[in-house]
Image (cartoon, rainbow, N blue to C red):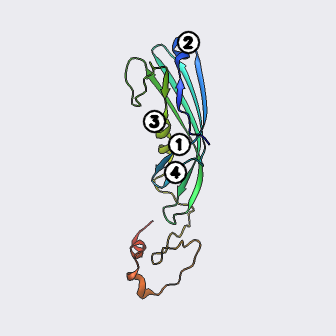
Amino acid sequence: MEQLNTQIKINDIRLQNNNLKFKSCGYLDIKYFGNEINNKNEIDLTVEITKEIESLNLDLNLNFTYVSECSRCLDRNNKDDSASFNKNLSTNSENDYDIDINNEIIDVLSIVSEAIISKMEFTNICKKDCKGLCSLCGKNQNKYVCSHDEKNIKESPFSSLSELDL
């Protein structure tokens, strides 16, 4: 799979009064709080740009898949999500995304990245009754049943996990 193309040629729309539709499919490398998008996760990008009097209206839609790590048991699961973004970019002033619409090409990478990251969760729990990791041995309690002696609780490097309220 190829990297997502986020560069849009807008030269035609600046000279005429019309709309421009742009579609791209690919991947980006994004890692954020246990969430990840890499070359195995596809992003579908659709952008519609409409020329107005002294600005361009940018309407961006994303469909994407990312890998999310459970905050309790560390299992990794795929999640499907979508995001949208609508912004009016003026031809006379700067904008928050450093997009100069007076150029022949604009790059919406910063907008795409921000839209994806805003949809990713800080803490993800794989299921309501996730048991997490064993505070003694670190094994996934959803897959293994541990039977440890009480006397070894304070000796384990994972003993501090038993005090967490997740």
- Which residue is at a point 56% across and 12% down the rendered structure image? 17
The nearer-to-camera label among 2 and 1 is 1
Q: Position of residue 144 (x, y in %)?
A: 58, 76
In three-dimensional space, the C-alpha distance between marks 4 and 2, rounded to whole angstroms, equals 40 Å
Cα gap from disc 3 to disc 4, whole angstroms: 17 Å
Mark 3 burial class by Cα count in 10 Å: few <14, some 14-19, many 20+: few
Residue assigned mark 1: 28
Numbered mark located on residue 17 in the image:
2
- Which mark sits nearer the N-terminus, 2 or 3? 2
Q: Mark 1 is on which residue type? A: Leu
Left or right of 44 in this view: 35: left
- Residue found 51% across the figure and 57% down from its top: 124
Q: Secondary structure at mark 3?
A: helix
Which residue was labeled with disc 3? 110
Q: Position of residue 61 (x, y in %)?
A: 57, 34
Q: Is residue 66 above or below residue 129?
A: above
Q: Circle 4 sits on which residue?
A: 36
- N-terminal label among 4 and 2: 2
Position of residue 145 relative to residue 89, above or below, is: below
In terms of sequence position, does the residue under pointer 3 or pointer 4 come before the other? 4
Classify residue 164 by image quadrant.
bottom left
- Under circle 2, the secondary element is loop
- Mark 4: secondary structure: strand
From the viewer's side, name the closer residue of 60 and 32. 32
Relative depth, front residue between 98 and 17: 98
The type of residue carrying mark 3 is Ser
